[in-house]
Amino acid sequence: MTKIFTVLFFILSLSIFSQNRIKILDSENQKPISYAKLILKDKSYYKNTEENGEAALENDEEVSEIQSFGYENLKVEKFQQTYLLKPQFNEIEEVEITKPKFQKSFSVGSIKKSSMGFSALNISWMVVDLFKNEIPDEKVYIKKIKIPTQVHNTIKEATFNLIFYENINGKPSLEKTKNIVVSCKSGKHLTEIDLSKNPIPFPKDGLFIGFEWIVNEQNTYSYITTVNHPDGTKEKNVLKHGTAPSFKAYESVNSNVMANSNLDWYNIFNTKTRKTVYSISMQLELTN
């Protein structure tokens, strides 16, 4: 029994000492920056900080850049335990509509579902879809967004970034226009984001809206699967790690779904090479 405890303690000690913990703070108020993105040198994946602004790095992981919406990107030249990000613009007090009065309601998109969906491992990505504004002669705003989400049963609550980009000639703009951190419960749910007190303008050109996974300890889960290799062989009972949540898609006539894995935007479903294409299962509720 003593030997078993000794071995377990040794393994736990190795795990602790093989990690370097860092913290990301706001340079002006010293508050932790939740879910900041850590770009890792010579790695095909990235990590995010936890809600408390902290993250654990393995010995072979080196941060080359730190990014967070609303802050200037920070190029990292040497290892530090604490990094400070400079706000990109002065904080402006947000006006909240306490008793909004809406005259008309419209909807864009669909929450239909199929067996097709989007999920992430530790190599994360961003996925967006173009939501077109086909409402004539009306200045409209987004008051609610509905997204079917699925969170692994070992996770009580997962978070993801709901991301917004301008539509520039059928492609997402270089910079995000808005980023909302959304929480979703364990299991299958229709996650709703209520924007009625702070409605988002919906331009005539429409918006690219989608999701970006937050790769951290909170959202990570493990599962056993079978791996099919290119040579036709199968490897059973392989331990894999995923990042919650997963999202759904539905079959559509045309697809404007685009993805980005920290390089450039590309079309996921090419109508020239695929018989079946899909759209993100998401519905916008609009109002004037």
Image (tube, rainbow, N blue to C red):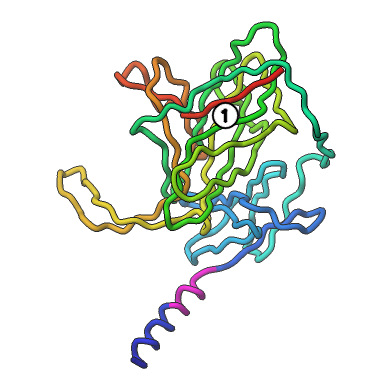
Q: Position of residue 16 (x, y in %)?
A: 50, 74
Q: Position of residue 287 (x, y in %)?
A: 68, 20
Q: Which quadrant holds the C terminus?
A: top right
Q: Which quadrant holds the N terminus?
A: bottom left
Q: Residue furthest bottom?
A: 2
Majority secondary structure of the magenta segment? helix
Q: Nearer the viewer, residue 102 or 75?
A: 102
Q: Position of residue 93 (x, y in %)?
A: 84, 39
Depicted 219 relative to depicted 163: above or below: below
Residue 268 visible? The answer is yes
Depicted 66 relative to depicted 254: above or below: below
- For label 1, count other residues whose C-alpha is less than 10 Å away and answer few (under 14), some (14-19) or many (20+): many
- Quarter holding residue 238: bottom left
Q: Residue at x 78, y 58 (%)?
A: 30
Q: Which residues are magenta?
A: 12-19
Callout 1: helix, strand or loop? Answer: strand
Depicted 33 relative to depicted 172: above or below: below
Q: Residue furthest top?
A: 137
Residue 40 visible? The answer is no
Q: Nearer the viewer, residue 194 or 237?
A: 194
Type of amino acid at the residue the image marks with label 1: Ile
Residue position marked by numbered label 1 in the rendering = 209
Q: Is residue 138 magenta?
A: no
Q: Residue at x 66, y 62 (%)?
A: 23
Q: Residue at x 42, y 42 (%)?
A: 119
Residue 32 is left or right of residue 60, and the answer is right
